[in-house]
Amino acid sequence: MSTAAMKSPAWTFDGWEMVVGLEVHVELATRTKLFSASPNRFGDEPNTNIDPVTLGLPGALPVLNRHAVELAMRIGLALNCTVQRCTFARKNYFYPDMPKAFQISQLDEPLNIDGYLDLPDGSRVGIERAHMEEDAGKSTHIGGADGRVAGAEYSLIDLNRAGVPLVEIVSRPDIRSPEQAKAYVSELRAILLAIGASDAKMEEGSMRVDANVSVRRPGSELGTRCEVKNVNSVRSVGRAIEYEARRQIQLLEHGEAVRQQTRHWSDGEGRTHTLRDKEDADDYRYFLEPDLVPVEPSADWIQSVRASLPMLPAARRVRLAEAAGLEAGAESVAVIVERGQDDYVLAVAAAGGDVGRAVVHVQQAFAEQPAEPLVPAADLAVLTSMEVANEVTATQAKTLIERLLADRGGDAKALAAALGFEAMGTSELGSLIDAAIDAEPDAWAKFCAGDGKAMGALVGHIMKSSKGQADGKLVSQLLNQRKTPTTG
Amino acid sequence: MSDRLTIDEVAHVAKLARLALTTDELRVAADQLGGMLEHFDDIDELDLTQIAPMTQPYHLVNVMREDVEADTLDRDEVLAAAPEADGGRFRVPSGGGAS
Amino acid sequence: MADQPRTVLEIAAGVRSGTLSAVAVLEEYLAVISAREGEVHAFNLVLADDARERAAAIDADVHAGRDPGPLAGVPIALKDNMCTRGVPTTCSSKILAGWKPPYDATVVTRLAAAGAVTVGKTNLDEFAMGSSTENSAFGPTLNPLDTSRVAGGSSGGSAAAVAAGFAALSFGSDTGGSIRQPAALCGVVGVKPTYGRVSRFGLVAFASSLDQIGPFTHTVADAALTLQVISGHDPADSTSIPEALPDYSAVLERGVAGLRVGRITDLPAGADDDVSARLDAAFAALAAAGATIVDVTVPAFTYGLTAYYIIAPAEASSNLARYDGVRYGLRVDAADTDAMYMATRTAGFGDEVKRRIMLGTYALSAGYYDAYYGKALRIRRLMTQDFDAAYQHCDVMLTPTAPTTAFPLGAKTSDPLAMYLCDTYTIPSNLTGHPAMTVPFGVGDDGLPVGVQILAPSLGEPVMLQVAAGLERAAS
């Protein structure tokens, strides 16, 4: 079993625990397919990205895409796997969107084995293997209920996706709670994005999760597991696992056995359905693919791929959090690292800016910006410095950010001057506060009686009358001073 | 007659291979395939435990291509040659297959 | 036509120099096809019009001072399992009826670039599974030397085409002897190169780790020239050998003096006496020409048949799974997808193909893999080790190519195992990947040709051709 230190609270239900392993399929961000040179592109017209290999035409032969191997290696190395000599095998089964009636995959000798993934909560999930395989095409079932094969009249086949390179990442059954499963998927996704291996879009199917779920009394033998398919978002991962574990517990509590099955998660209904029993699973008749030769990555090749790996999300979060004086688990830190904008925030700090203000601006205003935002770090640094020196108000800073984004940078000081942005002094504010108290007597009375919420109306009035040039913080400070006059 | 294979075993194999055999054909197939398997018993006399399997006759490794796009086939031409197509896609009667 | 068939070398040299017209040469061959194709049935398709156009273009090239290439104006025939763009490629199976590949096999591209003129696509045992070309969905090919007899198989159409004078050169695929056995039965030269020497891209797969394309010719020199054209690295075939090609024709005149020719003392029995007698005569002829005859043993030889009839069907069961009625070829409609697969495949495949698909499916299925497929792969290694050890003592080995001369039609169709035994001597070189070829060496008691097989180590084509040329000189 796992040596993982369980940091997140374990999920238990009436004395049962869940045992979960995840199989995550990710489509690799290559230009072409795993074994042929037609484009690997999502969203194209059906059956336009086809060639003899993709169609499984007689006489067509596969040739391995080197870049796909490198991306698969990147995944393995980022997940602390051993990268090894590997071979390809044929998995034989008939399905209309599997053109050769076999899938080329890796069986006994996968590229990556024996790794692990550390989660933000401190727990560790073992990685059994991360192997290469080709994707199938897409079947659309027409005439049945909710697009499923059962009850459909006919199916339409698009082979654009057939042959797209996949890596299947198989975790060990180390996961014990829905939260941990979600954290695993989120962290894995962050890593895939960081290393450029995949665009990892669950909604487009470029990252797909299957969950193997079983339940047991803690410390006892593993129970019979069910495989849950069609889990298409991080949120569904948690819901599907939770539902499935409860379903199995209920069966066992009623003295019934869990049958080994493949089950389909229906997000709309919030439940899983039987897809098929494992007993009548196909006999895949695996054998080594005779049209391909082994891949033997040299130590040099592995080393050069390892050297090309960027800093991984976990390390980047720690780095940014330390710089900004935040917790590594802070949402702002996670969001910025996921966007890859943490280098930028650190560059703002290096340019003399305030890292705390930079984190706030980048999190809030830079969602549409690339990893390297178009506003030069030095320009944002100037603005954040003005803010901490109280030279501009928060509202003015917001306006300036919008200008900097629209203009792809600029001198915040000059902009502020041109716009007449100068924070109002205490004496100027005094008359505005007087006017606000006159205009909002009820609010003032409530405020003086200790109702903190009433301050909002007063501040709002003052901000409005100052046309946003009043510093909100300073206004609050002055209002509080008025409420309790220093009588000496 | 060979009794090496039962009719049920042959029927299972035929199903895996998506071949429909009549009862008579299954009986003939069981006999013929069983006869071959008996002929293949000659290899049982060999001790092969120290011999590694050989899957390919010529030793090559790391045969790869660069990730560069090449011409694709013309969809209309391909679909025109298909047994049935519909809206730019291949059409098949539904159901029956494993998912 | 002349009494002696024209050789590839003569035609190409004549056309390149302008002394022969490609069109005139083609018409000679088309005339023979018109006269005899009806009784031989070597072709699934004759491409007379395309060939005339192509031959005229080659003559025009020569007139314009351009060299059409080493096979300029040579009429060739292609086994109908090699993809030809826009031209039906059937594998002699109903399941591929009407299918026109959207691409050319690498071999086809190379032959066109060398100036060859394709006259037709030849008949074969369906998907190359058989030893008599009787398993064709379009009827058998008959032996042009005696039309009551088979041409051998599976490349029977290509062997017959050269033997009958329908083409100066033809091509087959050899998975367990499918070039060498019909070549022997039709009295022509047939070569299976080292696995990986000739690209398989565009060859419709039977058994991927065994299949190899090779030529049928009248002479060893023609075979050497042809190998030079079709061999060499192809990035579209991952199993293609990258090493540079030697000059195959350079060795032909060297003689056999000093070469060590192996006689396999533990060769499986089964060859007819008249065939064995011709093998003895071949050893004697080579010895007389200065070669040393060396006794060697290849203990695993005898297990080749079993290993082959597990490995080849196993790979075939997977390779032929793609014929499912979805994307191309035959479809027999049914209510659901699975029923459609069943109906299509049951109607589309012939008995022998079904038999091998079943055998292969069984050999790979859960619970039987280790007993059959796993063991067969180990025998393959053992066989290769035995051959490598024997080649420590000899440069080449001789065996009969086929156990018998051409047999009567229908003689073996009811007993699959008897048919499989035709491949006893040819199978080992497919398992090891080594090159092998057959040269005609006299006739049997029935007056029909007997072929002698020359086996050589991996990439040993030069010494194999050298010995073949020696036998050819002795036979003439």
Image (spheres, rainbow, N blue to C red):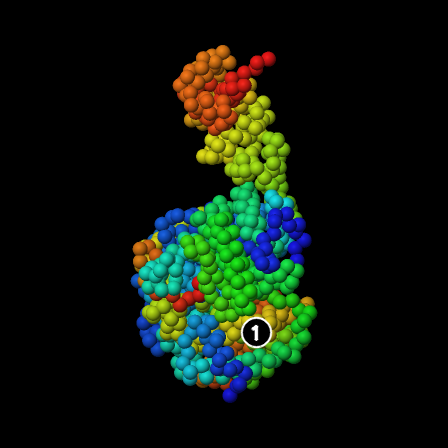
Quadrant in which the N terminus of chain A appears: bottom right
Mark 1 crowdedness (10 Å alpha carbons): few <14, some 14-19, many ≥20: some
Residue in the foreground of this view, choosing between A342 and A301? A342
Query: What amino acid type should be assigned to the residue bearing mark 1?
Result: Tyr
Q: Is residue A411 left or right of residue A10?
A: left
Q: Quadrant of residue A469?
A: top left
Q: Is residue C400 left or right of residue A444?
A: right
Q: Residue at x 64, y 59 (%)?
A: A218
Q: Secondary structure at mark 1?
A: loop
Q: Which residue is mark 1?
A: C368
Name the residue furthest bottom: B1
Task: Please say if A203 is above or below A229.
Answer: above
Task: Please say if A346 is above or below A226.
Answer: above
Residue in the foreground of this view, choosing between A334 and A141? A334
Name the residue furthest top: A427
Q: Is residue A251 left or right of residue C289?
A: left
Q: Position of residue A488 (x, y in %)?
A: 59, 13
Q: Position of residue A203 (x, y in %)?
A: 44, 48
Q: Position of residue C144 (x, y in %)?
A: 40, 77
Q: Quadrant of residue A155?
A: bottom left
Q: Residue at x 66, y 69 (%)?
A: B51
| One can see residue A136 in this view | yes
Chain of the residue under label 1: C
Q: Residue at x 39, y 77 (%)?
A: C140
